[in-house]
Image (cartoon, rainbow, N blue to C red):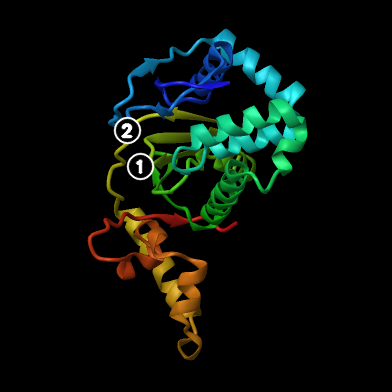
Amino acid sequence: MRQGEEVYRYDGTWQGFLCCVFECFERRELPVGICGGEVAQQSLYPPRRIVTNPERARRVARWLGKTLGGEVSELAREGFLSSLPQKEMHILRLLLLARKAGPMAAAAHGDPSVSALRAAVFSMQHEAHMLTGFIRFVEHEGVLTATISPKHQVVQRLGPHFSDRFPGERIVIYDDTHGLALWCHGGRWGVVRASVCFPPPDAQEEQWRRLWKSFYKAIGIEGRENPACRMSQMAKRYWKHMTEMEDEAPAGLPCTGRRNMVE
């Protein structure tokens, strides 16, 4: 496959990226870079607009699942949800390697792209796991709402957790980093692109916040406080959305009320 001189631009979706893979394989040409969404990356290379074609995306998806095996497909999909710089090019190089090595490509730890993707996926999965316990909810007219500011696109991984844990609740979790909203209701869930601004908590919600803060302080043991250990387990970037930590959140970060939901 020859090296091209164009930058692929697509809509930022997984299906759109699969169309970029199709275009690369069809033209037998490796792009200089791949830019998704509204990213306006300056480049000396001419852009090529890749239109999302559902049929092409399905063909590449079938090839991923049936030919390359679950591990390669999972690494590609999970890597796409990460915040790894130039993640699209790393995934494309993984797929090019998989064309030669087959399913064993996912175990090629010496390959720079495979190594980078594995590290990014681990970080993304760890962040999703942490947020299952750090998310604080506010109730608005029977809907439990929450705002998060994750590094990675973790709402897709949070969907199964909260829909299974609270099937009787209506839940909306807004990712203000990526402009994504997760909804859960009746054991089902989905993710949509949106810009959400939740109303401030009412008087009853404020009472719940005060009760939770009082409980948090009451169970603390002053002589055993270890701020360094706490920060290693609960990074400060989560604090602005946590009710019990909002008074200690770094200056300049807005704090919003959240009701705790114990796992």
Query: Horizontal and vertical percent for residue 29?
Result: 52, 18
Element under disc 2: loop
Residue shown at 41% from the left, 34% from the top: 180
- Residue 63: x and y in percent read 70, 19
* 248 to 167, vertically: above or below: below
Instruction: Tell me: 46 left or right of 111.
Output: left
Query: SS class of the residue under badge 1?
Result: loop
- Which quadrant of the structure image shows residue 259? bottom left
- Residue 229, given in percent of the width and then of the height, sits at 50, 77
Dot 2 amino acid type: Ser
Q: Residue at x 23, y 60 (%)?
A: 252
Q: Which residue is mark 2?
A: 195
Which residue is situated farthest in the bottom direction here? Answer: 223
Question: Which residue type does callout 1 highlight?
Answer: Asp
Which residue in the rendered view is the most extreme toward the left?
Answer: 252
User: Can see residue 211?
Assistant: no
Q: Nearer the viewer, residue 248 or 53?
A: 53
Q: Quadrant of the N terminus?
A: top right
Query: 10 Å neighbourhood of mark 2: few (<14), some, or many (≥20)?
Result: few
Residue nearest the observer in this picture, 178 or 9: 9
**What residue did someone put label 1 on?**
176
- Give the residue at x 32% y 58%: 206
Quadrant of the rendering where the C terminus is positioned = bottom right
- Asked if residue 42 lies left or right of residue 166, the reply is left
Residue 67 found in image quarter? top right
